[in-house]
Image: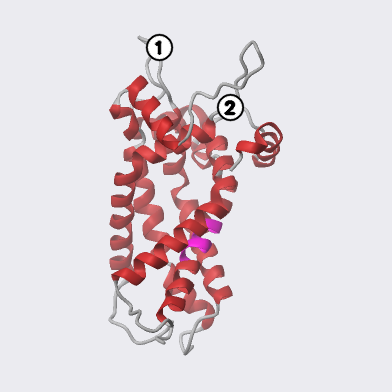
Amino acid sequence: MAADLQPKSEISFAEIFLCSAFAACFAEFCTIPLDVAKVRLQLQRKTVSEDGVSLPKYRGLFGTVATIAREEGLSALCKGITAGLHRQFVYGGLRIGLYDPVKTFLVGGDFVGDIPLYHKIFAALLTGAVAITVANPTDLVKVRLQAEGKLPAGVPGRYAGAFDAYRTIMKQEGLSALWTGLGPNIARNAIVNAAELASYDHIKQTILQIPGFMDNVFTHILAGLGAGFFAVCIGSPIDVVKSRMMGDSSYKNTLDCFIKTLKNEACCFL
């Protein structure tokens, strides 16, 4: 089996960063309607009618997509795309671009053999935390733009667009407000990045031990599917807290948001 560290063609950090950033941007462009629906579902609160029955506006992923398209138009499914591309360019480029250098640094440049799983996890935790700390303003703006639903006729939107949102937040709330929700965002993205990159790395190496499998596109797809599923299962509760902290100012802090969400909507928390 190929070792984790082995002679390979020299690829600069800039090249890895750009390739990762553009790949992440392409993925964001393809999945933005689902992301808008996810944020709306995460920010949705329980509503109770006169007879005491809970009546959620959005029901399920595809039901939410259909509701948004019907009430706000198809263009509403692309809300936050500009900020989303900003986020993916910065976060996607840094988290993947830094992963191999950090992993190599942790074990030493002279290490030969398979890098232990705990080193992969720690490297991914570090790179995920660093990347999202830099990219948090883009994530904040993206969530706020996506959270805005249908407005009454004649009522302008909170922000005219991504760049206006950056300016407005800094002007009205101060520069530090761009890092609102940083705590849960670091926790969410560090954990998801560790689950994603470390599990991808480990799953791929495990698959390569199976006779007949080679280091090709099919193996990468299998490893990516497994890593993605694992990361979503682990990161979903923290992602809900992150979105609510960024899109709703009624919470005192991360712990307050977590406790209130768990207490009031435990069955829907995931």
Rendering coords of residue 120 (x, y %): 52, 72
The numbered dot on residue 152 is: 1
Contact (Cβ within 8 Å) of mark 2 with mark 1: no
Given residues 82 and 150, the one toward you in this image is: 150
Q: Between marks 2 and 1, how big is the CA–CA gap?
A: 20 Å
Look at the magenta stretch and give its main secondary structure.
helix
Q: Earlier in the sequence, mark 2 or mark 1?
A: 2
Q: Quadrant of the N terminus?
A: bottom left
Residue 195 sits inside the magenta stretch: yes
Residue 227 sits inside the magenta stretch: no
Q: How many neighbours does mark 2 have within 10 angstroms: few (below 14), some (14-19), or many (20 or more)?
A: some
Quadrant housing residue 70? top left
Vertical comparison of 45 with 116: above or below: above
Task: Check disc 1 and report its element: helix, strand or loop.
Answer: loop
Which residue is denoted by mark 2 in the rendering? Answer: 45
Which stretch appears magenta? 190-197
Rendering coords of residue 103 (x, y %): 48, 74
Q: Residue at x 35, y 34 (%)?
A: 162
Vertical comparison of 68 with 221: above or below: above
